[in-house]
Image (cartoon, helix red, strand yellow):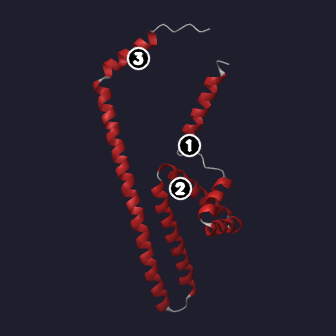
Amino acid sequence: MRFIIPFVLATVCTVQVAYAEPPPPPEEWLLELVQERSPERYEALLELKETNPERYQQALKRIGRMAHRGEERPESVKVMEEVQELQEEFREKIEEYESVTTKKDQKAIRAEMHVLAGEIFEIKQELRVQRLEQARARLTELEEEVQVRAENSEQMIEEYVDQALEPQPKGL
């Protein structure tokens, strides 16, 4: 029994470290989430599953990441949903552009696409700026932690050695 628990803990820790982000939620759960929030998108997702399984898997991964972000930062999910709506509108404009025959119509649709692309860019740029600010804040925290540890290194080392040499309590 003594060897099983450390093995299990090591296995769990190894699995956690292996992921750059948490493991993806189950497909059924993601589909239910989409169905609740946006029945139209749910239907489009099911159609995508049949017509283009590779894009379907990519969409599920994206939805899973959004769901995870939503647990951490619900406001970012709303922003990403807005980006997805704009991207869908952009894709519709591509189809519309390809279906028109006159240069005048193509020029008008291209102008609309330009506006949509600008909106998408601005939102994504703002998200990147926010992530940069968060990274800078985290970096500042780490720098402070390193400084405190450097200032207290002798005490920390002494406590570590003392703790290692303390008599261990007898078990049952």
Seen in the picture, residue 145 relative to 132 is either above or below; the reply is above
Residue 47 — which label? none
Tag 1 secondary structure? loop
Q: Could you say where residue 144 lies in the image, as x and y percent from the top left?
A: 30, 35
Q: Could you say where residue 94 lies in the image, as x and y percent from the top left?
A: 54, 78
Q: Residue at x 30, y 23 (%)?
A: 152
**Badge 1 is on which residue?**
19
Q: Quadrant of the C terminus?
A: top right
Q: Earlier in the sequence, mark 2 or mark 3?
A: 2
Q: Mark 2: which amino acid? A: Met
Seen in the picture, residue 36 relative to 159 is either above or below; the reply is below
Q: Earlier in the sequence, mark 1 or mark 2?
A: 1
Q: Are marks 1 and 2 in contact (CB under 8 Å)?
A: no
**Badge 2 is on which residue?**
66
Q: Mark 1: which amino acid? A: Tyr
Q: Mark 3: which amino acid? A: Tyr
Crowding at dot 1, Cα within 10 Å, few <14 / some 14-19 / many 20+, comes out as few
Crowding at dot 3, Cα within 10 Å, few <14 / some 14-19 / many 20+, comes out as few
What whole-number distance in Å separates the C-alpha atoms at marks 3 and 1?
Answer: 31 Å
169 left or right of 131 in image: right
Crowding at dot 2, Cα within 10 Å, few <14 / some 14-19 / many 20+, comes out as some
Q: Are marks 2 and 3 in contact (CB under 8 Å)?
A: no
148 left or right of 14 in image: left
64 left or right of 110 in image: right
Q: Could you say where residue 93 lies in the image, as x and y percent from the top left?
A: 52, 79
Tag 2 secondary structure? helix
What whole-number distance in Å separates the C-alpha atoms at marks 1 and 2?
Answer: 16 Å
Q: Residue at x 45, y 57 (%)?
A: 75
What whole-number distance in Å separates the C-alpha atoms at marks 2 and 3?
Answer: 42 Å
Q: Residue at x 55, y 77 (%)?
A: 92
Residue most extreme to the front: 36
**Badge 3 is on which residue?**
160
